[in-house]
Amino acid sequence: MSQPAGGFHQRLQTLSPRHQQAFMAALCERLLPNYVLYAQMTGAGNPAGVKAILDLVWEQLAVREARIDFERQAEKLAELEPPADDDSFGARRAVEVVVALTSLLDTLRGESPDAVLEVSRISKGGVRAFIELAEGEEDAGKLAKLLREHPLMADENDFQDTVLEAVESSLDRDALKALRLLGRNDGVSNLGLEAD
């Protein structure tokens, strides 16, 4: 299969809104274990609630005639965000899940042309924060090199490339099921973490 013309971001932006939504949904699936882990560690949050909203997104992608009130879903999602005064690493990663899913809901509620880039950046940003925390590198030059060469960042880039290639094809029900399975990534998040 020949590589489509243009860079990663350009290719993302030329996708149809539905294909962008599928890309974002797959990334949200992969982010979800970070929220689940936060909830398990703190007793805060509601993983089932977040998952239910993401389930509705997949339903909308599969059944275009589905009538889902994404305005209401966005309100529900806002209530599931970790408390603003919790600045822990886990809380920040859980907030990323909520923000990414909110960006996706924004596209289902109307216009949000840069949402797909935002969700891509959120996922990569979480990996970057995790690497910085784990490695404790202060030197900017060394950190940049570390980030480029780190297996978690390589995995994140490969994952996003694979999802992008998948959504550049036609998205019938089987393709969406396969994409969702890809996003679930055997229960391993973008940080290489698994929730119970």
Image (tube, rainbow, N blue to C red):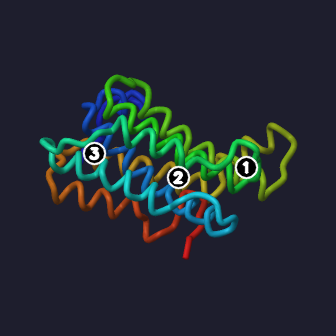
Image coordinates for residue 184, horizontal then vertical, percent: 41, 63
Measured in 3D between alpha carbons, the distance from the residue under mark 2 to the one under mark 3, in whole angstroms, is 17 Å
At horizontal 43% and vertical 26% (from top left) the residue drawn is 114
Residue nearer the viewer, 195 or 127:
195
Q: Amino acid at mark 3?
A: Val
Measured in 3D between alpha carbons, the distance from the residue under mark 3 to the one under mark 1, in whole angstroms, is 30 Å
Image coordinates for residue 152, horizontal then vertical, percent: 60, 58
Q: Tell me which label, 3 or 1, sits earlier in the chain.
A: 1
Foreground disc of the pair 1, 2? 2
Q: Tell me which label, 1 or 2, sits earlier in the chain.
A: 1
Measured in 3D between alpha carbons, the distance from the residue under mark 1 to the one under mark 2, in whole angstroms, is 14 Å
Tell me the number on the disc at residue 146. 1
Residue nearer the viewer, 193 or 82:
82
Residue topped by disc 2: 156
Left or right of 109 in this view: 161: right
Describe the element under mark 2 as helix, strand or loop. Answer: helix
Q: Amino acid at mark 1?
A: Leu
Residue topped by disc 3: 167
Image coordinates for residue 113, horizontal then vertical, percent: 38, 24
Image coordinates for residue 86, horizontal then vertical, percent: 75, 49
Q: Tell me which label, 2 or 3, sits earlier in the chain.
A: 2
Disc 2 packing (10 Å; few <14; some 14–19; many ≥20) = many
Residue nearer the viewer, 65 or 153:
65
At horizontal 54% and vertical 38% (from top left) the residue drawn is 121
Left or right of 44 in this view: 112: left
